[in-house]
Amino acid sequence: MTDTSPASTVRVRGAEGALPEQTWTPRLWGVLAVLCAVLFLDALDVSMVGVALPSIGAELGLSTTSLQWIVNGYVLGYGGLLLLGGRTADLLGRRRVFLAALAVFAVASLVGGLMNDGAMLIVTRFVKGLAAAFTAPTALSILTTTFQEGPARNRALSVFSVFGASGYSSGLILGGLLTGFGWRWTFLTPVPLAVIALVAGVALIPRDKPAAGGGHDIVGAVTLTGGMLLAVYTVVSAPDRGWLAPITLGSVVLAAALLTGFFVAENKVRHPLIRLGILRIGSIVRANLSIIALFGSYLSFQFMMTLYLQDVLHWSPLEMAMGLLPAGLLVAFGSPFVGRLIDRYGTPRLITSSMTSLTLGYGWFLATAGNAPHYVVTILPTMLLLGGGFAFGFSSIMAQATDGIDDSEQGLASGLVQTSGQVGAALVLAVVTALVAGGTTAGGGFAEFHPGVNLVSAVAVVGLALNLIPLLHRRPKQS
């Protein structure tokens, strides 16, 4: 049977055994557009809800600790099952899993917009995260198996990143506008967009065959998700209960036991959620740790700035959104060029540049903020440096995390790097929230947020060292 999929042109080898240049057909562009639309929708949803957090807290009577669960509920549902989502896509077929999960995402968005109870709102966010845990790795694995490794894939990843940044930027503006009419609109707006993407996906994404063999690792999924949820819950609740309280210590022990059980299970089950051998590849390990530094520091910093600008400075949601917008715009306009830069300089140098930009951004903020950060002097330069870091980092990390991986494990590789980013971001945000909630407000102004900014700065420095040291060691050998 003739292969009519968009990737068919990359599967035919030339006379000398080399893959020919991939032809970008209209259908190929259509598939990429659907995948980009889902990433756009995910980023749109996250940024819109972020803008609405103070309004949600005021109407539903939620504390700062509870508000972070609206973010972390989604992030943990997302990150906890990403690996299972990627593996499921490999086993059951990427198209089938992608479309089913997108439908659940739309329904969860609708239900969330109708909730009046804070706890139930968090539950709907968790369910929505679970759905995204299947759409995200499936979209990325469809992309990496559709586009040939090299220039074509790097170009596609760059376009993919642009839509993520555009969704984030659009979400800031829409969130600011819609929150003025009521925070519920930030939950309801993604519903029609998800339905449109679902219809387009049915029409454009080619059918693929499930894997010939394999199975699910339910034990791994349960222990990983349970361990991560309990770890984040322990960090968030410890400031109120006490770090040495029996329930806190018990939660730490149980979370450690669950996560230890996960790694033990991966060595014993027939079809592990993670083939641990993939973690022996240094470049993939660095990519996964780098995404933790990128997502963890940036998401936590945005959370703090959202609360500071609206609750302390009393900016309107729209003013706050416009204040944070430069970072998203820089990512949107800078990402299209990253694919060419990867081809020329390689992912290690670009990831190092990304971590350098992040570190400089947080460092500048700490050096100039004082107790009352000035927007032009402190916040704007910081957002530009963070936007540059994200623009260089996201596509480069994704390319490095999936390079050299067989098509049969693309779902695993893409799910692994996204899991690292989401779960790492949840843990960093949990610690930041604990520091902010337990900080003193005696000095007023920005004083209570300083410990959190110190932490995200340290996370960025670790990410920089992680990539800079191997790069410096490699240069003498090349010379």
Image (tube, grey):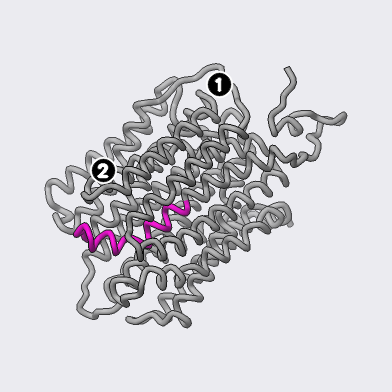
Which residues lie in the magenta part?
A: 43-63
Considering only vertical position in the picture, is 347 above or below 194?
Answer: below
Mark pair 1, 2: CA separation: 33 Å
The amino acid on which the numbered mark 2 sits, given as a three-letter code, is Leu
Q: Is residue 477 visible?
A: no
The residue under the point 50% across, 44% down is: 417
Residue found farthest to the left: 246
Label 2 residue SS: helix
Which residue is identified by label 2?
Answer: 230
**Residue 75 in magenta stretch:** no
Which residue is identified by label 1?
Answer: 211
**Residue 57 in magenta stretch:** yes
Query: 459 or 174, which is in the foreground?
Result: 174
The residue under the point 71% across, 55% down is: 340
The amino acid on which the numbered mark 1 sits, given as a three-letter code, is Ala
Quadrant of res 406: top right
The residue under the point 38% across, 33% down is: 263
Counting from the top left corner in percent of width and height, residue 312 is at: 29, 75
Query: 87 or 180, which is in the foreground?
Result: 180
N-terminal of the pair, mark 1 or mark 2, is 1
